[in-house]
Amino acid sequence: QVVMYKFAIGSVAVALLFYAVGCQSTESTESEPSQSASTSASPSASTAAASVPTDAKDVSPLGEGDRAPQLTVRNPDGQDVSTAKLFSKAPTVLVFYRGAWCPYCNKHLAEIAGAHADLKALGYQVVGVSPDRPAELKGSIEKDNLPYALISDSDMAFSHAFGLGFRVDDATVHKYKNSYKIDLEKSSGYTHHQLPVPAVYIVDTKGVIQFAQWDPNYKTRLSAEAILAAAKQIKEDAH
């Protein structure tokens, strides 16, 4: 397991508390919650390029000091949202996750929800981003009572701009759909069969990445405690 991360907190160490959570892989045999299949939509031309990695280990994510991409995503109502305007509102804790169909992602989102009040008190906004189409986001917010925003990157353009996107192999897509009733096409509305490597970024109001953590092993997630510690340190360093 290879863990890659960059910090923007100088020489001060932040404890990273990981817990083994993730989404179903080709090797795992654990069961997943059911989801009804549906007719898939057309693929996105912008993310169907042959250059898309076919292995999560081959992604090349942005890191500390890089500028966050300025693109258009969608909110749960299907309305366009400018990421430049989003980041300008407040320092942002940006959480990339695989989708509402993933119980381990949901657990991570719920843990971060527990730290939301403290993050908000520090002046941060929390934003979750996934390939889920807007309608799926609404279901997540209502079901899990999440206190922060979720945005849809259903065509995966935003995830790819961050260097996090990869294509799920055909065997895994088939296994998800037929063994676990997880339909990636239904969730995103596209046939690209792509997911982001789970990641946590902290982006300042100028759009500069101050903290970055990602791991191709989806079972490794950054704890809410570590996210909060990093956010506090960035605030302290700014003063």
Image (cartoon, rainbow, N blue to C red):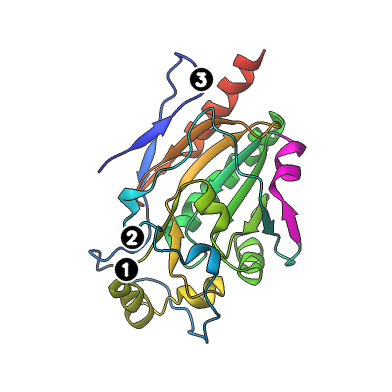
Task: Give the overall secondary structure of the magenta segment.
Answer: helix
**Amino acid type of the residue tagged 1 in the rendering:** Asp
Left or right of 159? Residue 182 is left
Question: Circle 3 sits in a helix, a strand or a loop, which is it?
Answer: loop
Pointer 1 residue = 169
- Residue 42 in the image, given as x and y percentages of width and height: 54, 79
Q: Earlier in the sequence, mark 3 or mark 1?
A: 3
**Amino acid type of the residue tagged 2 in the rendering:** Thr
- Residue 4 in the image, given as x and y percentages of width and height: 35, 36
Question: Circle 2 sits in a helix, a strand or a loop, which is it?
Answer: loop
Q: What quarter of the picture does the C terminus occupy?
A: top right
Left or right of 219? Residue 7 is right
Q: Residues within 10 Å of mark 1 (few under 14, many from 20)?
A: few
Q: Is residue 101 above or below residue 115?
A: below
Q: Residue at x 41, y 58 (%)?
A: 52
- Residue 45 in the image, given as x and y percentages of width and height: 54, 69
Identify the residue at the far bottom of this view. Answer: 39
Query: Are discs 2 and 1 less than 8 Å apart at CB?
Result: yes
The answer for how far apart the CA atoms under marks 2 and 3 are is 32 Å
Pointer 3 residue = 9
Question: Comparing marks 2 and 3, which lies closer to the viewer?
Answer: 2
